[in-house]
Image: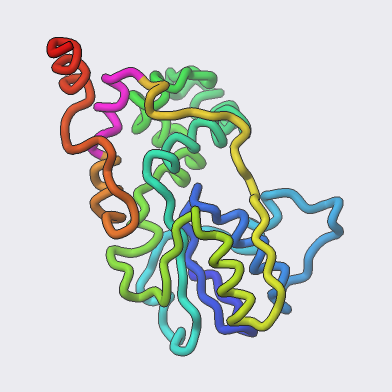
Amino acid sequence: MVIRVDAHKLAYMALPKAGCSSVKEALARIDPAVTLPAEHDITVETWHAIYPTQRFRKHRWIDLDGHFRFCVVRDPIKRLLSVYTNRVLEFGDLRNSRNIRRGHVDLPVDPDPDFFFTNLEAYKAASSSINHHAIAADIFLGGAFNRYSRVYRTEELGQLAWDLSLWTRQDVAMPRGNASGSALSLDDLKGQTIDAIRPFLDHEYSFLSDYYQNPLGGRLYDACVTQTRRVS
């Protein structure tokens, strides 16, 4: 679903784990069509209930002439790792998986990151939430960026707030919503784990090549590590 704020002629296509909680909150607070609950009742889920994130469908972009059409993208490695730190560790999505709880799938609900990522496809099949947050960016944003007025990186959320302020002639604040409290980097994963997620990351970096460079360099991580050790 395209998130539209027609009063200000805004159209936003959300990508999970790419600042969408922050952007949704910023939009909801300036959208006259939205009635917010009391502040003490607001959680991060409030924004997703107001503006659900759905996959890209071309027909949903009809009648958007004159709208400021934008999306936000994130470095693929950071986005994928946040699925584990945020959805697995902080929100406990795997504990809420009926397939796992009922024994339909033999997977631990508290996997370490290496087990989780080497079995990512199995976890996506077992948990709709994990699947939703780990789907490729082009599924949510469409196969090309020429339909957008501007594409922002998550590092540019401050610029997005400024641009929205200019566009709407209102003060737009960009809070940092749903930030993960746990740190995880590629260096924390085993080489074989990195190789297991390489096909997904290569696809993501290819799609986002105008915004992020693939740091893996097109070579298998284990092979690189082995060669480096031999040389040294």
What percent of the width, then of the height, locates residue 90?
Answer: 62, 31
Q: Residue at x 49, y 37 (%)?
A: 82
What percent of the width, then of the height, locates residue 9?
Answer: 56, 83
Q: Which residues are magenta?
A: 190-199
Q: Residue at x 46, y 71 (%)?
A: 70
104 inside magenta stretch: no
Is 2 situated above or below 6?
above
Choose top left, top right, bottom left or bottom right for residue 150.
bottom left
Say left or right for 93 vs 63. right
Is 196 situated above or below 217?
above
What percent of the width, then of the height, locates residue 207?
Answer: 27, 55
Q: Is residue 67 visible?
A: yes
The C terminus lies in quadrant = top left
What percent of the width, then of the height, locates residue 159?
Answer: 54, 66
Say left or right for 13 vs 139. right
Q: Residue at x 42, y 24 (%)?
A: 116
Say left or right for 4 vs 203. right
Q: Is residue 98 visible?
A: no
Q: Residue at x 61, y 42 (%)?
A: 179
Q: Residue furthest front?
A: 232
